[in-house]
Image (cartoon, rainbow, N blue to C red):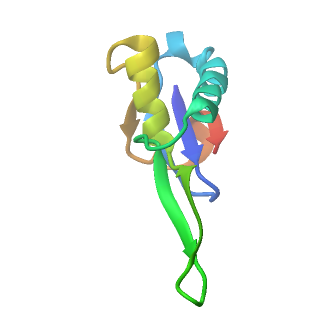
Amino acid sequence: MIMKISHYTPEGFYYYVPDEYAAQIEEWRNEFSDFLQSIEGKHPFTQYMESVNFDGELEYGVFVRSYGGDDFMDWINVEKLKCRGIYRIPEPPDDTEVGIRIDF
């Protein structure tokens, strides 16, 4: 099955998902979301951002979550499958072949 993951845009990335895993994608998406909510501080899925005012003073500095479709697939492959079971593929000729759609 083909899965398309978009991140705030209509464009996206495409992944091959074996049929035996397709039914679990939504459950894994929820688990991945819970995992992301548990992250604190510096982590591969975070990025440090800060705001400096016109006087050059730091207004705030914070780690924000930073991830994409590949991160979700990597998490599934490592945490759930323990192998490379899902992988990115080239964009199909049209979206009619897409069976699973996820918007982050």
The residue at 50%/45% (across/down) is 67
Of 2 and 36, nearer the camera is 36
Quadrant into which the C terminus falls? top right
Q: Looking at the picture, tell me which residue is in the foreground, 75 or 43.
A: 43
Farthest residue, direction top? 20
Q: Quadrant of residue 62?
A: bottom right
Q: Residue at x 46, y 42 (%)?
A: 45
Image height check: is 34 above or below 59?
Answer: above
The percent position of residue 76, horizontal first and vertical second, equals 46, 22
Q: Is residue 21 left or right of residue 53?
A: left
Residue sitting nearer the eye, 34 or 9: 34
Q: Residue at x 56, y 43 (%)?
A: 5
Residue at 59% of width from left, 52% of height from top? 7
Query: Total marks drawn?
Result: 0
State the image coordinates of residue 30 (x, y, percent, origin top left): 67, 25
Q: Which residue is situated farthest in the bottom direction here?
A: 54
Q: Give above or below for 57 relative to 97.
A: below
The quarter of the displayed image where residue 51 is located: bottom right
Q: Residue 54 location in percent, x, y?
A: 59, 90
Q: Give left or right: position of 80 versus 103.
A: left
Along the viewing direction, whichever of 86 and 45 lies nearer the viewer: 45
Name above or below for residue 1 compared with residue 47: above
